[in-house]
Amino acid sequence: MLFRDIVPAGGPRRKIDEIEILARSIKNIHPVDQVVGQQIRMRRLARGLSQSALARAVGVTFQQVQKYERGTNRVSASKLADIAKTLDVNIAVFFGAEQLPNSPTADGLDFSRMTRVDFLITRELLAIIDQPFKSTILGLLRAIRGTRDEDRTLELASEDRDP
């Protein structure tokens, strides 16, 4: 027996029905919609935009942007084009094969696990122009994490110096 079956008609039953509909819709989120939403979120944070700012730029409410980012609402093609233009990216980045479910990038990265802080750190690192300094930061991060991959660090540093 379900809770809704014992609630008198006209009472909180309508709210329970709405919650059940929402729960069913969340379970049915298509993986591609989820990936597109994650990409929108990642690109928005990388640009330093709030959900409200993105929403104003593309003509929707910030709640709609939240739904896009969670994948609970699908983004129309025209709205996705508006979002891509606002975020200054090619529309194809929202469908990157490396971001499809169960497909980590070639480096083994899983962008779906990135937090807001991860995006902010990435944005700040991208703003640093001095490549030797970036290599120093990489070494520091690896020391904090407890890994040693000096060969790869040297390889990356030499790649950065080549014209």
Image (tube, rainbow, N blue to C red):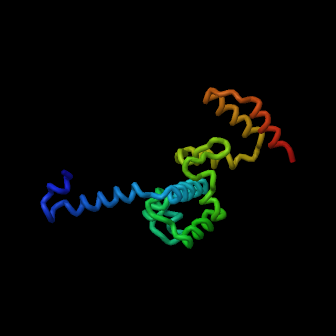
- Quadrant hosting residue 140: top right
- Count of marks overlaid on the render: 0
User: Going by the image, does 130 lie left or right of 79?
Assistant: right
Q: Nearer the viewer, residue 25 or 160?
A: 25
Tell me, yes or no, if residue 88 can be seen here.
Answer: no
61 or 4, which lies in front? 4
Q: Whole-percent x and y of residue 136?
A: 72, 34
The residue drawn where x is 59% and y is 69% is 81
On the rendered structure, is 14 left or right of 62? Answer: left
Left or right placement of residue 3 versus residue 159 in this view: left
Q: Residue furthest front?
A: 1
Q: Residue at x 15, y 62 (%)?
A: 11
- Image x and y of residue 95, in percent: 60, 59
With respect to residue 19, does 103 lie above or below? above
Quadrant position of residue 79: bottom right
Q: Residue furthest left?
A: 8
Please, is residue 100 above or below residue 56 in the view? above
Is residue 139 at all visible to an observer of this figure?
Answer: yes
Tell me where residue 157 appears, x and y as whole percent. 79, 38
Q: Position of residue 69 (x, y in %)?
A: 49, 58
Q: Residue at x 71, y 46 (%)?
A: 128
